[in-house]
Image (tube, rainbow, N blue to C red):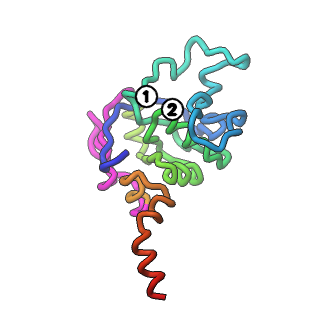
Amino acid sequence: MSNNILNSKTFNLITDNIDTDQIIPAQFLTTTTREGLAAGAFYNLRFDDEGKERLEHVFKNFDATETAILVGGNNFGCGSSREHAPWSLLDLGFKVVVSTQFADIFRNNSIKNGLLPIEVDKAALDYLSANPETQIDIDIANTSCDIQGYGKIEFPLDEFSKYCLSNNYDQLDYLISQKDKITAYEQQL
């Protein structure tokens, strides 16, 4: 997500209280790298207890090349504080999650890892729920999104998070970008 703009269709998973264990089950938490976690994302929705793909599941026709916005129900990302949850969503191809409410730890982990959580009101979520694959144009710099057929809404995002997400920075990238200022300050001491 760069240049402050993201345009994508939505993918609906309108279920309340999607917890981090549903996003990425515990058996996939053995890695400390972000790559390959898409295989475990929403595993129990996609596979049965024997590991066989379910004949019908919500992700059956998911296409990450066309869909970068996941629309979830209320209280998305509740449960444990596993950072693997946003990693797996990013690896699956999502850049944004839309919900009426996010668990605080999930929201913070998402922002720190480059996944934008957009909080909307119930009316906007109801519209997205009734209109799958809706086109949304997101403007990070202005913290707004234009939902095709619904209208423009604003979402909360602090200045530091906005800066980092707009520049594809995590917190360490930000510090590195300030190296000259840090060096100049240290030389004054």
Please say if 171 is above or below 76.
Answer: below
Q: Amino acid at mark 1?
A: Ala
- Residue lying at the far bottom in this picture: please name it: 189
Label ID, residue 64: 1
Q: Position of residue 77 (x, y in %)?
A: 58, 43
- Chain part drawn in magenta: 131-160
Q: Quadrant of residue 127?
A: top left
Please say if 46 is above or below 21.
Answer: above
Image quadrant occupied by the N terminus: top left
Please say if 113 is above or below 127.
Answer: below
- Residue at screen point 43% across, 47% down: 118
- Residue at screen point 69% across, 18% down: 51
Element class at badge 1:
loop
Element class at badge 2:
helix
Label ID, residue 92: 2
Please say if 152 is above or below 13.
Answer: below
- Residue at screen point 41% across, 34% down: 68
Q: CA distance from mark 2 to mark 1?
A: 7 Å
Locate residue 92 relative to residue 153 in the image: left or right.
right
Q: Check residue 140 for magenta coloring.
A: yes
Nearest to the observer: residue 176 or residue 152: 176
Nearest to the observer: residue 143 or residue 123: 143
Q: Position of residue 145 (x, y in %)?
A: 31, 45
